[in-house]
Structure formats: structure tokens, C-alpha cells
Amino acid sequence: MKEPVFYEPFGAPGAGDNVFTTADPKLHSLLRRTMANSFSRKSILEFEPQIWDTANKMTSVLQREFANRPRNVNVSSMLRCMMLDVISVFAFGKDMGALDKEGFAEEVLTAFNNFDTSNFMFQGSPRLRQILLPILSNIPIDNFQAVTRMLAKVDEQLAKISLTDKSSSALLKGTMESREKMGLPVTKLILRQEGLGAIFAGTDTTAISLTYGTWAILSNEAIRSKLTEELRTVWAHREEHPSLNTLEGLPYLQACVKESLRYATSVSGRLPRVVGEGGLSVQNYNLPPGTVVSSSNYLMHFDEDVFPQPFVFDPSRWHTGDVAALKLRNRHLVPFSEGSRRCVGMNLAQAEMYITLASIFRWFKAVEVVDKEIRGHRILTTAVPDGVWAKVASIKDEVERESSY
């Protein structure tokens, strides 16, 4: 089971129990089953048009405000804004308007930056969190006020949602279908709990993987041009984008997605678990029930015996002819964890990554990558870069190319 002292502070303020933070195995199993429909492959394919809408909005802003001028864009902030808008549409049927903010300066994401640090303090004193958060939310501190305003937006949108209208949001549709089968009620409190859990758990994790991948591809013209040429085979004109299924069938894009997930290791900190009844035997060591243990995705993803030159972003490592080596690499690629606690949002995150990387690298290339390395990130639970700056130029579609000859 999850170690409760570690996980409980990661819940959204006032959100209550949700599938991302609850430690109790029975409650987690119940909550996961009620959300299974929402995050199923079928549901994500139905939600695909909304992901494309948000990606198109992002690239329109990137073209208008940055490529046309041209001026530097904060890639990390842009991708975090996109992920926040996608997950809020998924959960509540309406985006947070993050992509509309000048320079992608979304105040909620600024507040997110401090959550890991404050959570470590609250883990040492869970009672302190219960006392302080209600007080701090009423004090005019920008970070806390930003979250308070976000919660107000959520509650405003929830007030407009009808619990009898499954089209209100993808999360509501799946939750209703699952709970109806199980004979359980659906309330707005439940939707609020799971929706906020999805926002807090699913915004930065995917954005970090995309940030590292985008930076690495922009920084390597050989990788960028190879990816663009592959995308050109299925996407000739801006207005006629391919399907997610088509994108997933592109070998080099698939390799870039996998390498981004490995290289970023967005959840880089250790995630503790408690040894259950019967104990656990690890390499001839017997651990009694109640022992707190943990592992690290980072150590899996940067194991030199599995991934030669692990600190090099190399999509070609996923195209090796060595079947045994490839099988081992796939086993060691665990960005979403494994087993019964595997990330329930995996299908959504992967869809976001395919569509976002395709949208960027089919239509943009680097003029200059200002940051030659990613600096200022924090290795706590998630490794959020302080900012990755680049200057980009647009790539013409087939009609524009033909007319220029």
C-alpha cells in the first residue's frame, strides 16, 4: 500500500480522497474501478478532438506571438499551460484559459512550483497542513490566492454541470457509467475530488516529459528533421491533421515519445510503499510487515547496462535490432509505474504526448535554443524546469511549399 504520510499532502486542498492520493488499498481499488471507464483507451479516443483543439490553440499562439515576430518562447511554460487546459477540459468540460495568458504566464502554475517543497514540510506534520491551509487561503499571498481562484473556477463550472448529462465532461461520462454498473451514486463532490486529483497529478507530469523531449529535439537538428519528415508523410496540410491512431503507427515519433518519457523521468523522486502482511523478501533480506520501502524511476531509466549513454537523448535506441536488448529496455521504461498502482491516466498522457510533439515538430523548427542545458530543476517528486527558452520558425505546409517554387 502507499505510505499515507507521504501521499496525503499531495491532494488538492479541499478535494478529499481521490485515486491519486489515497493510501487505503480497498478504497483505492474502489476509486480506480469507478474511474476505469474515464481513462480507458475508448474514452481517450472519444476525447481526442478536444486534445487536438487545445494543441491547435497552442500552435496558433506559438505562430502568432513567437514565430512571426520572432521572439523567445518559454517552452516549459507553454507546455504546462497546454496540459493544464487539456486536463481541465477532460475533468470539467472547460479549460482554465492558461494558453490565453500573455507569455504563458499562468499564475496557477507558479503556485504549483512550490507545492513539492511545502508538501515535504507538511509530511512531517500532517496536522499542520489541516491548520494552515484554511488560514493561508485567506491571506493575500499570490501563490495561495492563485489556487483559491482556480478552485473557484472549478466550482463555477461544476455548478453548470448536470449530473444527468454525460456529455458535460469526459471524466463525468466515464465516472457515471462505472458507478451505475456498480450501483454507486454520482455526486458533484465526487467529480470535484477526482477532477482536482487529475489536475494536480496530470498537469506537470506530462508537461515535464514534453518539455525535456521538445528541448532535446529542438537542440538536435538531425533528430528534428528526421521527425519532421516522418510527420510530413501523414500530415500535408495544417487543417487536415492525422488521427491519434495514425501518429502512434509512426516508428520514429513512437521512439521520440518513449525517449522523452525515459529522459525526463518526470516523477524522479522515490515513491514509498508499505510492506503488507506476510512481509517481503528482497535478495535474501526479509522485510517485516509495516516496513517502508521505495524505488526510483530515475535509477531504472538511467541504468547504463540497459540504456548505454543514458544521459544522451537518443530515439534510435528504441530501433535496435537486438531483440533481447529492446525487450529489456521496454521492461525498464516505467514512467507510469507498474502493477495495481500503475497510473490510471496513462492513456491520456500518451495521447497528449503524441499529439503535442506532432503538432510542434510538423510545423516548427528551432532558430536558436537559448538554453543549452536544462537548469534549475528540482529533484523532489517531480522535476519541473525553471524555464526552457528557444526561438522557433514555422515550417511551410505542402501548398505553401509548392506556391513558393
Image: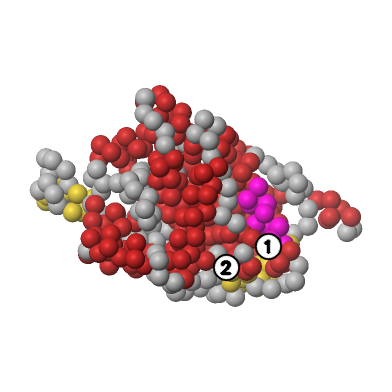
Quadrant assignment, res 301: bottom left
Q: Main secondary structure of the magenta part?
A: helix
Residue 282: x and y in percent read: 17, 49
Amino acid type, label 2: Ala
- The reply to whether residue 230 is in sight is no
Question: What residue is shown at x 41% (from left), y 49% (from top)?
Answer: 197
**Among the two numbered marks 1 and 2 on one chain, the one whose residue lies closer to the N terminus:** 1
Question: What residue is shown at x 36% (from left), y 53% (from top)?
Answer: 14
How many discs mark residues in the rendered view? 2
Question: What residue is shown at x 55% (from left), y 42% (from top)?
Answer: 160
On the image, numbered disc 1 is attached to which residue? Answer: 62
Quadrant assignment, res 137: bottom left
**For residue 22, side relative to residue 324 (left or right):** left
- Which span is picked out in magenta? 53-63
- The reply to whether residue 189 is in sight is yes
On the image, numbered disc 2 is attached to which residue? Answer: 105
Residue 334: x and y in percent read: 38, 49
- Neighbor class of circle 2 (other Cα within 10 Å; few <14, some 14-19, many 20+) is some
Quadrant assignment, res 27: top left
In this rendering, the label closer to the viewer, 1 or 2:
2
Q: Say which quadrant the N terminus sits in.
A: top left
- Front residue (pair 68, 137): 137
Q: Where is 117 relative to 401, above or below?
A: below
- Front residue (pair 147, 287): 147
Residue 234: x and y in percent read: 70, 43
- Front residue (pair 265, 72): 72
- Front residue (pair 180, 53): 180
Amino acid type, label 1: Leu
